[in-house]
Amino acid sequence: MALAALAAPLLSPYQPAQIDAGSILCAPSSAHFLGTDSLGRDVLSRLIYGARISLSVGIIAVGISTLLGVVFGSLSGFYGGSVDAFIMRCVDVMLCFPAFFLILAAVAFLDSSIFNIMIIIGLTSWMGPARLVRAEIMALKEREFVEAARASGAGNLRIIVRHILPNACGPLLVNATLAVAGAILLESGLSFLGLGVQPPVPSWGNMLTEAKATLGVAWWITVFPGGAIFLAIIGFNFIAEGIRKELG
Amino acid sequence: MGKYILRRLAGIIPLLFGISLLSFAVINLAPGKPVALENSLNPRVSARALERLEKLYELDKPVYERYWHWLKRTAALDFGRSFSDNRPVIEKIAERLPVTIIINLLSLFLIFAAAIPLGVRCALRPDGMLDKVMTAAMFFLFAIPTFWLALLLMNFFGINLRWLPVSGITSLNYEYLSPVEKVIDLLRHLLLPVTVSSLGGIAAMARYMRSSMIEALAQPYIRMARAKGLTERSVLYKHAFRNAVMPLVTIMGLSLPGLVGGSVIFESVFAIPGAGRLFYEAVMMRDYPLIMAEVVIVSILTMTANLLADVSYAWIDPRLRDKR
Amino acid sequence: MTGTLLSVKDLNVVFRHGLKEIRAVNRVTFDMRRRETLVMAGESGSGKTVTSLAICGLLPEGAASVSGSARFAGEELIGMPEAQLRAFRGRRIAYIFQEPSSFLNPVYSIGEQIAEAVRLHHGAGRAAALREAVKLLEMSGISDAQRAARSYPHQLSGGMNQRAAISMALACRPELLIADEPTTSLDMTTEAEIIKLLMRLKQEAGFSLLFITHNLAIAEHIADKVAVMFKGELVEYREKEELFASPEHAHTKELLAAYEKVGKF
C-alpha cells in the first residue's frame, strides 16, 4: 500500500481531479476499475492519491507525538520529583479530555490544512509514548550501566540519548505503529466531517463525506475508501504484532 | 472510605485547573489575535460578531487578566451568546445535551451487557471456537472506521432493506403517535446509532473481561473454592466473576472520553440533534462561544463520570475501601 | 473408629506440557487410619502437594492425568464423576493451604466465606450460617470473632487468616483434614500457635490429619507416621519413632541432618 502511494502518478489510470462529465457515478467497469464519483472522477485514482495524504498525515503526526512523548517522558522519568509530578498531571488532564472535541475545537480556530492537522493530532496524542518512556527510564536509571556512564562523567542528556533510549526503542516502535493506525483513523474521521483535508485534495476520509450524499445510489464510493482505511489499519496492526513478536 | 473520596475530590482541583488552562489556550491558539484573522478567512463571521467576540474575551487586556475573567464567567456558566442566532450558549447546550447523555448511557449499558457474558464465555475455553471468533471480530472492529460502519449499516438497513430510519431521533409524524408508538419510534431511531457507537467498546471490553476472568481463575482462592466442594457454577460466577468484573469499572472510566468523542461523528452521520452535532455545527460556523462552552462542559462531564467510576470502584472493592 | 480411612495405592500423576510428559507422582502407596496424623515430608517439587490434590480431583483437568487408586472409607475417588466427588470435598475431606491470604477470596468477608461452606453442606439459612461461622472462629481461638467475621482477608494477619481457613475447613466436621504447608508462610511464634490449635481441634473433633511440610521438626512433634517423598516417589514410610531412630533412605538422612543443624523445634 505504501508502495502504491509512492508510485501514485504511475499507477493511477486518471488524474485524480480530472472531471469527466460524460461518466458521472459510473459503476465499476473496465474503464474505471472502482467506478467514478458524482463529478466523474475515477475512484481508484483518487484512492491511490488519497493513500499518499492519509499515510503521510498518519506517519508525520505520530512522528510528532513520539518525539514529544520521548522528551516529556525522559524529563519526567529522569528528573522525577516535582518535574515528574507536573508532567504526569498534564498527562492526566490531556487524557480526560475527549481528544476529538479538543482537536475539532483547535481546527475551528486554525484552518484545516494538512499541515495543521498533522500538528494537532501529534499534539494531542503524546501521552502514550510519554508514559512508556517514563516507565522505561524509571526502570533503567538505577541499573549499573547507567551508573557506570555517570561515573565516567557523561552528562544527563548524553546518558538519556546514548544509554537509555536505545533500550526503550522496541516498545516505542510498537506503540508508534499502532498510533499511526489510530492517527489515520482520526484523520479520516476529521476529513469525513469536512474538517480535515479539504477537497479537492483527495483523502480517504473526505471521499467518504461524498459517499454519504450518494448513499444508496453508488455503493462503490462508500465501500472502497472505507475498505482502504480498514486495510491500512489492519496492516499497521499486523506490523505492530510482527515487531512485538520479533522483540520476543 | 470518606477520606478516599475527599482525596479524590481534592485531586480534581488541579485537573479542573488544567482543563480550564487548556481550553483557554485553545482560544488563543490562532496565530496573532483570534479576532484579526477572521476578516479574511471566515466571511461567515460578521463584523458585529467580531466586536462582540472582542468584548467577550477582552482581547485588549493582558493574558492573565483575561484568563481570570474568563474563569469567573465560566464558573457562573456564563458562556456568552451564540454567533449564529444570538441565544445564550448555555441554553442551546442544555437542550441538546440530554440526547447525547442518553445515547452514551445506552451505549455503555449495551457494552457491558454484551461484553461481560462474551468475555466470560471466552475465558472458560481459551482458544476454543468462540474465543477464536471473538479475537478475529475484535481485530475487525478495531480497524473499521466507525463512521464508515455507520454508513454501511445505514445503507443496508435503511436504504436497501428499509427496516430502520436513517436519521434523526423521531419520525415526522411523531407528534401524532400514541405513547407506546412514540417509544417504539424512538427506539427504532436509536437502534443503529447506539449499536454503532458501542460495537468497538464491546470488542475491547470483552477482551478485558476475558483476560481478567482468566487471571481470576488462576488465583489460589479458586482452588480453595473448589476444595470447599462448591459447584463449578458457584466457583465461576461467585468467586471468580466478582473479582474479574471489578477492574472493568476503571477501564470503563478510561474509555469514556473516546466514547464521548465519538458522539460528534455518529450524531453527524445519523443527524441526531445532540450536543455532538451541535458542536460540529458550531465548528463549521466558527461559532466560538459555543465551541468553547462545549469543550469545557463536555470535558468536565467526562471528568466527573471518570471520578464516579473511580469512587464506585473503591466502594465495591473491599481492598480499596479502607486503604488510602 | 480405628479402621482404615484412606488407602492410596499406586497413585500416578503425569503432567503434559505440549509433547513433554512430566511424571510428578510415581506409584505412591500409603494408608491412613482414623484419627491418625500422617506427616508427608519432602523438598518443594517432590510431589507432596500434587499427591494431596490428586486424591480429591483438584488438579487442573486436561493438563494432568491421574491413575491408580485412592479409596476413602471404602469408596474409590480416582475416576469418580465430578458431581459425586463434590460431596466429599469440604464435607468429608477438607483442605487448608500454604498462603491463607491468597487462598481466601479478597472480595468476600471472612464470615461470608465460612458461612458459605456451612450452608453448602448443612443447608442452614443465611443468618444461622453466619452465627455458626462466628462460633467456628471462636473455636479456632479468635477472641473477637464477631469482628473477624466482618473483616476481609486483607485486614487480618497471616495467622488470623489461617485460623479463619481452619474454621472454614472444620465447618463441616470432616473426617480427613489435608493441611498443605499451613505454617510455612508464618513466623515462628504463629507457626507454633497454629500447630497447637490444629492438634487441639484434632483431639476435640477426631479427624485424621495429613500434614504436608518440608520441615521434619514438625513431624517429630505431631506425627504418628511419617512419609518422605523424593522426586515423585515415596521413599520412606514408617512409624515416626522408627524413622527418627534409623532413617534408611539417603534423602531422609539429608532432611534429618538439615533439621539437626537448624535445631529442635
Image (cartoon, helix red, strand yellow):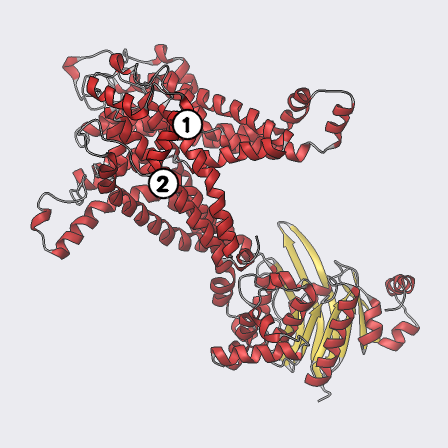
| Residue B118 at x, y percent in the picture | 41, 53
Residue B180 or residue A24, whichever sits in front? B180
| Residue under label 1 | A183
Q: CA distance from mark 2 to mark 1?
A: 17 Å
Crowd around label 1: few <14 · some 14–19 · many ≥20 (10 Å): many
Cβ atoms under marks 2 and 1 closer than 8 Å: no
Residue C88 or residue C68, whichever sits in front? C88
Residue A184 or residue A107, whichever sits in front? A107
| Residue C251 at x, y percent in the picture | 86, 62
So how many labels did they put on this image?
A: 2
**Residue sticking out furthest to the left:** B176
| Residue under label 2 | B259
Residue lying at 25% horizontally and 25% vertically, measured from the top left:
B284
Asked where in the image residue B172 lies, by quadrant, the reply is top left
Asked where in the image residue B68 lies, by quadrant, the reply is top left
| Residue B99 at x, y percent in the picture | 24, 44
Q: Chain of mark 2?
A: B
Task: Single out the mark in the foreground, 2 or 1.
Answer: 2
Crowd around label 2: few <14 · some 14–19 · many ≥20 (10 Å): many
Residue C38 or residue C21, whichever sits in front? C38
